[in-house]
Image: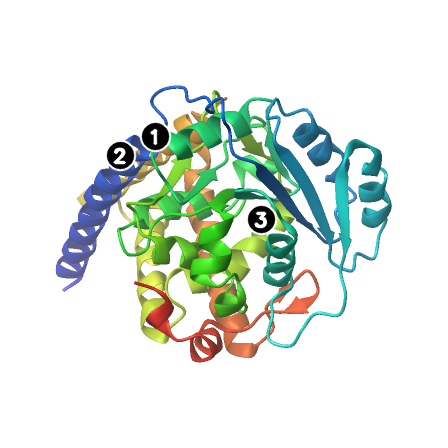
Amino acid sequence: MIIVIYSILTTLLGALLITFGIRLERALQQFRIKKQYTSAIEAPSVTVCVPARNETHAMTQCLERVLNSDYKKLEIIVFDDESADDTSVLINSFAHAGVRFVPGANLPEGWLGKNHALEVLAQEASGTYVLFLDVDTHIEPTTISRLVGYTMTENLEMVSVIPGRNDAWRPGVLFGHLRYYWELITSREYSPATSSSLWMIKRHTLIDIIGGFSPHKAEVEPEAHLAAIIGTKAYHCLVGSEDLGISYEKKWTSQCETSIRLSYPMVGGTKKMGAYGLLILTLLNLPTLLIISGLFVSWTPFHGLAVLYLVLFSLLYCRYTYVVWRRNWWLGAVVWPYAIAQELVLFIRSVRGYAKGTITWKGRPVTSPQQARLMHPAQYIK
C-alpha cells in the first residue's frame, strides 16, 4: 500500500515538474523584450502616479529616479494616503521640481486603501498614458521612453513589468516570496500574469471604457482584473530586463505580509481552489520531507527519487532566478527547499487569515475574495 502511495505521489510530482517547466519557459520567452524600443518623435504624454502610505524609507529615491527620466512629456503625481510619518513632507520637498502632491482624506466605505489611491491618481492625471509606480520600484532614465516605445509599437492598451532584482545577497531576495514565479507559471489567456510594481495603461481605456477602479474597489489585485478585461491582444506582461531597467527592493518581512495578503486571492479565493493550492504546495515540499525522513529510516529508491526531484525543481527555479535576479542567480538552487517551505506556511496563513477576517493592508482590513466577488460580479472579467 505504501509503495502504491509513493508511486502516485512521484507520478504527480513528475507531472508538476513537466507542467511547470513548459509554462515557465513559455512565459520567459513570451514576456521578454527581444529588442530595444524608443518612443516616437511625437511621443504621448505620460503621468507617473505614485500611491504612498508611510513611505519615508523609499520616497526620496523613488522621486529622484523618476525626475531623472529622459522622457520629456512627463507629469508626476503622488497621493499621500494619510501617512503617519513624514511622507507628505518629503513629497512636498519635490514641489519645486514639478511633483504634484495630492493629500488623502477619509477612506470611502468599501474601498481598499491602495485602490482608492489609484482611483484618485487616475482622475487627477492628464497624460495619454498613466503609469502606476510603487515607491520601492526603481527605474532608470530610459525606462519610460522604452516602455512607451514598446507599448506604441505593439499597439497595446496596457502593459505591466515584473521587476528584476539587483541585490541578490539580501534576505529579501534569497528568502523572498515566490509571487512572480507563480504569476509566470499560472499565466493564461483569461488570467494573464500581472505586476503591481509598475504598470501602464491608456487613461482613456481606464477611465472612459472600463470605468476606473470603482468596479474593482475591493479587489486585492485590481491590475489583474483590468488585464483580464483588456485581454492578451491588447495587454502584455513583461519580465524586466537590464535594458528596460526596472528593479525593486523590498524587505523580507514586507514580502511575507504581501504574500499572506495575495496568496489566497491568487488561487481564486474559494475553498475548492484553496484546497487545490494547499495540495500543490504540499507536493512540492514532499521531496524535502522524504529526504529528511531518510535520516531516520532505511533508505529506499523513493528517497533517491526525492533527491532527483528536489534537484530538478531547484534547477527549474534557477531558470527563473537567472532571468529575474540577474546576479548570483545560482543561489536559487540553494534556497529552493526553504523558499517552497515558506510558501506553504504563508499560504496557510493567508487562507486562515481570510477565514478569520484578520488580513490587513498597512493597518486597514482587507475584504475577503468571496465578499469582493459579491460586491463586484464576475461579469467584469472576460
Q: In terms of sequence position, does the residue under pointer 1 or pointer 2 come before the other?
A: 2
Q: Nearer the viewer, residue 214 or 211?
A: 211
Q: Earlier in the sequence, mark 1 or mark 3?
A: 3
Horizontal side of residue 66 vs 267, given as left or right = right
Nearest to the eye among marks 1 and 2: give it: 2
Specify the amino acid type for callout 1: Arg
Q: Which mark is residue 183?
A: none
Residue closer to the observer: 271 or 10: 271
Which residue position holds label 3? 255
Residue found at the very far front of the displayed protein: 42
- Marks 1/2 in contact by CB < 8 Å: the verdict is yes
Q: Amino acid at mark 2?
A: Glu
Helix, strand or loop under label 3? helix
Q: Is residue 179 left or right of residue 317?
A: right
Which structural element holds mark 1? helix
- In the rendered image, residue 210, in percent from the top left (x then y), is placed at 44, 61
Which quadrant of the structure image shows residue 132? top right
Q: Which mark, residue 319?
A: 1
Q: CA distance from mark 1 to mark 3?
A: 21 Å
Residue 304, position as x, y percentages in the image: 23, 39
- Disc 3 residue type (three-letter): Gln
Q: Report whether 279 appears left or right of 203.
A: left
Q: Which mark is residue 25?
A: 2
